[in-house]
Amino acid sequence: MMNIAPFVSCEQVHHHQPLINFRDGITMDPFIPRRRKDKVVVVIGVTGSGKSRLSIDLANHFQVEIVNSDKIQVYKGLDIITNKVTEEETCGIPHHLLATVDPNEVFTAADFCQHASTAVESITRNGRLPIIAGGSNSYIKALVNDDIEFKSRYECCFLWIDVNLKLLHRFLSERVDKMVKDGLVEEAREFFNPEGDYTSGIRRAIGVPEMDQYFRNENNKLIDEDAHRRMLQRAIEKIKVNTCKLACRQRQNILRLESQLGWNINRLDATEAFEKKSGESHQAWHRLVSEPSARFVRHFLCEQLVDIPPPPPSSFLPAVATATH
């Protein structure tokens, strides 16, 4: 188990209306700061960059709960293909919207906004820090930029794990090979659709449509064993290519959102952590990603967002000073 440090206390203070009335229509409004918005951390990055890892790392510094924003990982099933974080890897940190939706259900961005808002409200009400993490940038945009109610209630800190794409492509290729060893083919077979419809639900996941032709010919006795193996290898290569294409699209989307929406995104270059092996890789990750992220979040939680204007000189100064104190 991780040792979870107490949640930063500076954000636990709520401002209440002072029980003071002034004559002649004078009010305390100029001296009462607006209620601060609740804080939310958003971890973004392309597939395979380590978003779940960073989110769980932050539990070493803050009391957090994680809201999944990956549009495929919200579905039940395909744990290997969708690379869901395992129960052991969660280290006991509560995860919301992870493997909760029926595989055949259509789950839209509007659905995500509704469920994610409910989860975030519950997390903040319990005095914990919500971390929204996932690679589906359309879901993130719909929630933090287009949902008016969410924007009015929450302020976001964006952490972007960036990795050199050429290096990441090699990592993603190796990850697909590991998935195959772990049972990707058997898992995909459960969702093989003879009608060839891979446009909705969990069947959209990269790793399922690519296996279609292989499954269709799996029991074809007119095709010899070597041809079957080549067919399987082509399907695996297609999964690798489509995964790398997805990473490229996701990175372009992040750059576009940063430019168009003016988001203040804290970029964390994790390239060195992907270059190195074993122990050195872990050290580079903590130095370049985990530790700087904790500093960004700590500053985000504690910064003074509202300046209280000084009271004007008047006969009411003592009362105002007392109320402000």
Image (cartoon, helix red, strand yellow):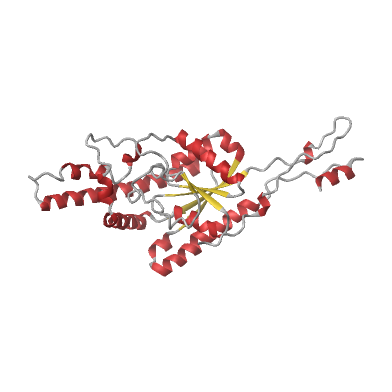
The extreme top residue here reads 24
Count of labels shown? 0
**Residue in front for this viewpoint, 113 or 254:** 113
**Residue in front for this viewpoint, 188 or 280:** 188
Q: Residue at the spot x=41%, y=41% of the render? A: 71
Relative to 4, 23 lies left or right: right
Q: Residue at the spot x=49%, y=59% of the render? A: 289
The extreme left residue here reads 222
Hey, which quadrant is residue 182 in on the image?
Answer: bottom left
Residue 66 x %, y %: 50, 49
The extreme bottom residue here reads 279
| Above or below: residue 268 compared with residue 107 | below
| Above or below: residue 166 compared with residue 217 | below
**Residue in front for this viewpoint, 263 or 22:** 22
Q: Is residue 256 visible?
A: yes
Q: Residue at the spot x=41%, y=49% of the render? A: 46
Hey, which quadrant is residue 167 in on the image?
Answer: bottom left
Relative to 193, 107 lies left or right: right
Residue 193 x %, y %: 25, 38
Residue 12 x %, y %: 67, 49
Q: Is residue 142 visible?
A: no
Residue 98 x %, y %: 43, 46
The extreme right residue here reads 315
